Amino acid sequence: MPSSATAVRDHPELAGSVAPSRRTRLFALPESRWAALALALFLAGLAAQLSGGPPWLFWSLYLACYLAGGWEPGLAGLRALRDKTLDVDLLMVVAAIGAAGIGQVMDGALLIVIFATSGALEAVATARTEDSVRGLLDLAPDTATRLNPDGGEETVPVTALEVGDLVLVRPGDRIAADGAVVAGASEVDQATITGEPLPADKASGDEVFAGTLNGTGSLRMRVGRRAEDSVVARIAGLVERASRTKATTQLFIEKIEQRYSIGMVVATIALFVVPLLWGAPLTDTLLRAMTFMIVASPCAVVLATMPPLLAAIANAGRHGVLAKSAVVMERLGATTMVAFDKTGTLTHGTPELTEIQVLPGAGLEEDELLRLVASAEHPSEHPLGAAIVRAARHRGLELAEASDFTARPGRGVAARVADHLVEVGSPAAFLDQRADANTADAAGSGADALVARLRLRGHSAVVVLVDSRPVGVLGVRDRTRAEAPAAVAALTRLAGAAPVLLTGDNSTTAARLAGEVGITDVRAELLPEDKVAAVGELRAAGHRVTVVGDGINDAPALASADTGIAMGGAGSDLTLRAADAVVVRDDLSAIPAVIALSRRARRVVTANLVIAGVFIAGLVIWDLAGTLPLPLGVAGHEGSTIIVGLNGLRLLRRAAWHRAARS
């Protein structure tokens, strides 16, 4: 996989990056430093004002705060104005200057600090998303062992690999390129690509992916794609492009702010210029125009939107759901379709022994068979072996000492336990081998039937041989989360449509899991780009899609959906960055609850906008039709702000979450 320099060359969107794995610090960005300086100057000015210092001192500090926090948004606003767009940042800077012009310099400085801080947080969030994308590009190694035609080996940069090259992958190595196995056998952990919870057995002819982890065997593979075309590189590109697309999404109030802001500016100028043309006094005209600008300013409208959404964010955070912004909280309530990943999302993501089938005539009880298998598997590092050992210990079985342990990549393990040769492994390795050797017997036929039944029910089957004779079959599967069926049912009620299952796992396992939790639309064996395409289809059909997932392979789908929710317990770093919200406690029931809470927040926002609109209209009419005293205008403006703020803060109460959870 490319080094940082190569990654920049192959992925222009990462230009300027130096260290792929570095996490951007808060004050490493200029936006953060300017915001911090503006805050410090504001606090110093406030302290000087409250302590009775000379006016020139706190005015100087406040004006310095204006410069520190306002120059960047002001400059950006002027550039937008040059492109015939009225930027809200420019309006806020103008409003702050206007406040200073009528003696309200502290209010203007506070507005500058709020906007500078918001911009800094957005810059940090963007930078850390890019950090995660660069970290994804670092999953695969920088070098590979290429096999020459003369049989020699050489270590080369991954970027030097060409399609058709032969590469040696040793045990424990990460695979350096997408391709196909031509010799050898091993198990490969490819959860980063497909999301499957168990390592996949690989032998000649099987496909492998860059960035996946080889197990105990040695593989020879033929390169099928160059580094920049690998699946893991395409995942990084998908996340980057989807993140840039989603960055254009705005709050509802921001969608109408252009028209409102232009109207307010035009009205303020007219209210100042027209009376002057008719001979009105300059001071009175300026005071009326400034009063109009204050009472017509969108402060109450902005607060009508933000407090309910921020209160909902805080309440959800207390209950284990972290929404990353007010935009996210607003968008969650618009969900009309939820798409789930399977492994680690609807399931726990770890294999569990679920069935023990002893073959007739084996002469063993279930516990005795399990004790033999667990004793043989105890030295193994394979996840299936760990699941079997956990099950034996859960039953309180005492494991015997195993000797002559052998791990056979792609086949299983063998060990001598209590003077018996115990072999545990895949049906393909043991049963097919017996058939090829023309030694099939009734026990072998019975094992075949059990394997078939287990697979139909979505289990991974493990065959057990004692002294070369089949004695049992074990069923292992990923455990479904207990709350999954209720969460699916609640989301169906909320969204008006049943959720969809998008998984890289095989169709049989996916269908079994979907049947358990109540999902009928199942799309299985999907690569990350296929999941993105599926999300695109749902959105094209008119749905507002929320995707729930946990693995790196889910990150592109989370980023391309209207809203992405990551399961935080086992979620990869890139997934957590690409997601808009994170379920910290890994409780699926929190997802319908946070969507219901978001919908309530949207209703409160609507009510607040009505309240703010009534106050603004009343004060503006008063100012235009009569003479609205400035103190009364300020009181009315601030009063409406307080009312909508308090109304929104009702969503902070625990009762709001409990009502949402019962929806």
Image: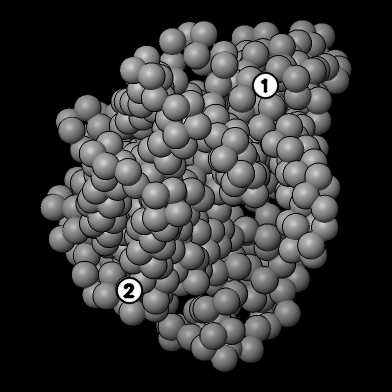
Q: Badge 2 local density, few (<14 within 10 Å), some, or many (20+)?
A: some
**Residue 405: quadrant of the picture:** bottom right
Q: Is residue 422 above or below residue 349?
A: below
| Residue drawn at x 43%, y 83% as measured from the top left | 366
Residue at screen point 32% across, 30% down: 260
Depth check: give the residue in front, 338 or 222: 338
Q: Secondary structure at mark 1?
A: helix
**Drawn side of residue 181 relative to residue 360, left or right:** right
Q: Residue at x 39, y 55 (%)?
A: 632
Query: As drawn, is 516 to the left or to the right of 354?
Result: left
The percent coordinates of residue 531 (x first, y second) are: 37, 34
Residue 257 drawn above or below residue 506 = above
* Residue 223 percent location from the top left of the image: 62, 17
**Residue at numbered disc 1:** 14
What residue type is disc 1 on? Answer: Leu
User: 478 and 131: which one is in front?
Assistant: 131
Q: Residue 656 — which label?
A: 2
Q: Looking at numbered disc 2 in the image, what kind of residue is underneath it?
A: Ala
* Residue nearest the observer in this picture, 184 or 576: 576
Foreground tag (2 vs 1):
2
